[in-house]
Image: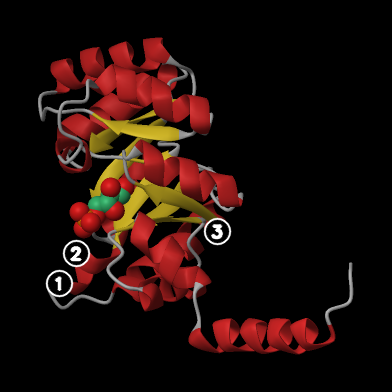
Amino acid sequence: MDLFIDTANLDEIKEIAGWGVIRGVTTNPKIFSSEEGVDLKTRVMEILKVLPGPLSVEVTTNDFEEMVSEAMLYASWSSHIVVKVPMNAGGLRAAKVLGEKNIKTNVTAIMSVNQALLAACVGATYASIFLARIGDIGSDYSEVIRQTRSLYDRAGYKTKIIVGSIRHLQHINQAAEAGTHITTVPYKFFREMAHHPQTDKTINEFLEAWNKIKQPV
Ligand code: E4P
């Protein structure tokens, strides 16, 4: 299972890419809206210099024609860009058309196995299942992920599952357990994943013991 980072903040991407633990970046219009004063294309190109894709960039319309023309523009910036399209009729049509032009797609805001099946049927590169937002209405997100993975494997679909909408550390473990291919994680959780009070205590104990004998290394 791979980890992506779910942010458009360059400092966050630089730091976590520097750890060597992420294989891609996902964004959406809401994530970009918190990066004030930054031009979309400029930031996209900055991100790709730090981590050369895959970088998901979402269309900003529900209209099929507009989706395709935005997607063509994004794809002209770099072949490492994956165009995110919404999980609706226009988004599915767009994913099919874009796939035929060899443009990678990510069908986003998937909340059910039925939707994940449709994304695979149009040949989407990725299907983004929104874990916490499924749980918000009382549905079982682990079952949605588990059944989707099982369906994809049995049918031989090449579409990869990305689990997003992560609210706490246990969600990352639950997504992995349910069989996701990739989980996209907000910056703050990488720091929380790396930290454990018993680890800090243990490392400090070892260093204090070593410092008592003060041998050169
Ligand atoms: C994933 O690609 C999305 O950017 C993200 O995880 C959305 O989830 P949220 O809006 O529930 O945080």
Q: Mark 1 points at which residue?
A: 136
Question: Considering depth in this image, is 180 or 206 the residue closer to the camera?
Answer: 206
- Judged left or right of residue 116, residue 134 is left
Q: Name the residue under label 3.
A: 154
Q: How far apart are marks 1 and 3 (CA)?
A: 29 Å
Q: At 38% across and 65% down in the image, what residue appears?
A: 189
Q: Label 1: how many residues lie within 10 Å, few (<14), some (14-19) or many (20+)?
A: few
- Indicate the amino acid at tag 1: Asp
- 61 w.r.t. 116: above or below: above
Q: Position of residue 146 (x, y in %)?
A: 43, 70
Residue 13 appears in which quarter of the rendering? top left
Q: Position of residue 54 (x, y in %)?
A: 48, 34
- Indicate the amino acid at tag 2: Arg
Whether the residue carrying mark 2 lies under 8 Å from ligand 1 is answered with yes
Of label 3 and label 2, which has the lower sequence position?
Answer: 2
- 186 w.r.t. 208: above or below: above
Q: Which element carries disc 3, helix, strand or loop?
A: helix
Mark number displayed over residue 133:
2
- Indicate the amino acid at tag 3: Arg
Q: Where is residue 104 in the image (x, y as percent from the top left)?
A: 43, 28
- 216 w.r.t. 198: above or below: above
